[in-house]
């Protein structure tokens, strides 16, 4: 673990907790384990339609058997001596596979508190995310599972004017 002080604060632990919560609470989603595919977390089992707590961008519905990659980020994160909007971290190889499969991203903005209260969510086609990431890719070195990654501020996808950090989506409490 990095310099973070607890497992709750770990990006991996937060991502796993968000994935589990979303897959359990959205009945049209089914978990896909890493033994099956490492490039997405879930798939739709039946038709998925937008709701007030899960808006869709660029599409009107998601058909059955579509791969869904769940990405979460904090509403704000430290950037030296100030705060900035959180960013989704995307691995190029996984993104390319999702793009080829006609997959979707389920993007979630959360508060860094116990229970990870969600303040915004959206389903976005990988094709739209691909356009938003076009000049953001960079190479990473060292012993990592990916060679190229990109970061995307949540505000490039979700309108900040519609996000209230005191109100949650999906029946959670702040």
Image (spheres, grey):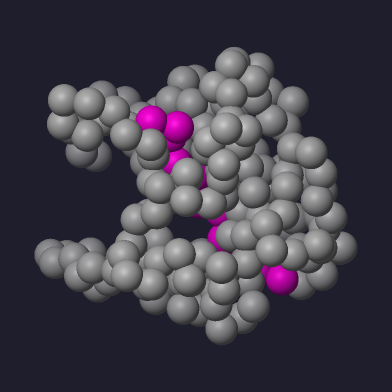
The quadrant holding residue 108 is top right
Tell me if I can see residue 146 in this picture.
Answer: no
Look at the image and tell me whether residue 116 can be seen: yes
76 to 101, vertically: above or below = above
Q: Does the stretch in magenta take in 74?
A: yes
Question: Does 71 appear above or below 164?
Answer: below
Residue 25 horizontal/vertical position (percent): 75, 40
- Quarter of the image with the N terminus in it: top left
Which residue is drawn at the image coordinates 74% and 37% (left, top)?
53
Horizontal placement of 42 versus 44: left or right?
A: left
| Residue at the image point whose x is 46% and y is 78% from the top | 96
Q: Nearer the viewer, residue 97 or 52?
A: 52
Residue 26 rendering spot, x and y as whole percentages: 77, 46
Q: What's drawn in magenta, residue-wise?
A: 66-76
Q: Residue furthest front?
A: 161
- Magenta segment, principal secondary structure? strand
> What residue occupies the far left of the structure in this picture?
142
Q: Residue at x 54, y 22 (%)?
A: 165
């Amino acid at each position: 673990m990095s310099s973070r002080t607890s497992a709750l604060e770990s990006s991996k632990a937060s991502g796993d907790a968000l994935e589990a919560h979303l897959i359990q609470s959205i009945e049209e989603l089914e978990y896909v384990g890493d033994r099956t595919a490492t490039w997405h977390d879930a798939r739709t089992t039946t038709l998925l339609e937008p709701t007030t707590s899960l808006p869709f961008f660029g599409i009107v519905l998601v058909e059955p058997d579509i791969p869904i990659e769940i990405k979460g980020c904090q509403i704000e994160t430290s950037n030296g001596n100030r705060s900035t909007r959180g960013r989704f971290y995307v691995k190029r190889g996984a993104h390319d596979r999702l793009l080829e499969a006609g997959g979707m991203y389920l993007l979630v903005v959360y508060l860094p508190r116990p229970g990870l209260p969600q303040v915004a969510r959206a389903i976005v086609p990988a094709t739209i995310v691909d356009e938003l990431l076009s000049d953001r890719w960079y190479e990473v070195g060292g012993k990592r599972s990916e060679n190229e990654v990109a970061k995307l501020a949540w505000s490039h996808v979700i309108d900040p004017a519609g996000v209230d950090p005191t109100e949650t989506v999906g029946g959670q409490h702040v």
